[in-house]
């Protein structure tokens, strides 16, 4: 199973948003594979399942996360907000006071 770096970044962002919608076991599989960089064999040993079962779980969890995003679009909205806030901060016609408030919005 191979993912591009962009896939890792996207899936980790989706996981941050949708983690509560996954079971604890699914969260464990995800964390072992994507966050702790365990191999499929290492995860299989920890979870007491076959390597193929881990592979299928990782694919299923990735699919769930993408499905949640397709329905809820939280990541897309977050990225759009960040882009708009950056544009506002770089707008030279805005006062420093307003830019400071926009900067605070970024931290929320």
Image (cartoon, rainbow, N blue to C red):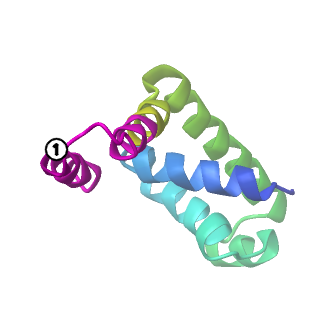
**Residue 22 as seen in the image, left or right of residue 43:** left
**Residue at image coords 15%, 48%:** 101
**Residue 29 as seen in the image, left or right of residue 51:** left
Q: Residues within 10 Å of mark 1 (few under 14, many from 20)?
A: few
* 99 part of magenta stretch: yes
Q: Which residue is mark 1?
A: 98
Image vertical order of residue 67 relative to residue 51, above or below: above
| Most foreground residue, 14 or 95 | 95
**Residue 51 as seen in the image, left or right of residue 74:** right
Screen quadrant of the N terminus: bottom right
| Most foreground residue, 67 or 8 | 8
**Residue at image coords 52%, 31%:** 69
Residue sticking out furthest to the right: 1
**Residue at image coords 74%, 78%:** 42
| Most foreground residue, 64 or 107 | 107
Query: Where does the magenta region start and end?
Result: 83-108
**Residue at image coords 52%, 51%:** 13
Q: Main secondary structure of the magenta part?
A: helix
Q: Name the spot of residue 45 as percent of width and height, x first.
A: 72, 78
Image vertical order of residue 35 relative to residue 16, above or below: below
* 89 part of magenta stretch: yes
Q: Name the spot of residue 16 as percent of width and height, x first.
A: 44, 53
Tag 1's secondary structure?
helix
């Amino acid at each position: 199973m191979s993912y591009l770096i962009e896939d890792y970044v996207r899936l980790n962002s989706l996981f941050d948003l949708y983690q509560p919608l996954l079971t604890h076991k699914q969260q464990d599989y995800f964390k072992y594979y994507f966050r702790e960089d365990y191999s499929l064999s290492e995860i299989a040993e920890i979870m007491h399942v076959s390597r193929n079962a881990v592979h299928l779980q990782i694919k299923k969890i990735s699919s769930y996360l993408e499905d949640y995003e397709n329905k809820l679009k939280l990541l897309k909205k977050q990225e759009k907000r960040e882009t708009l806030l950056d544009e506002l901060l770089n707008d030279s016609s805005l006062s420093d006071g307003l830019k400071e408030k926009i900067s605070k919005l970024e931290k929320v």
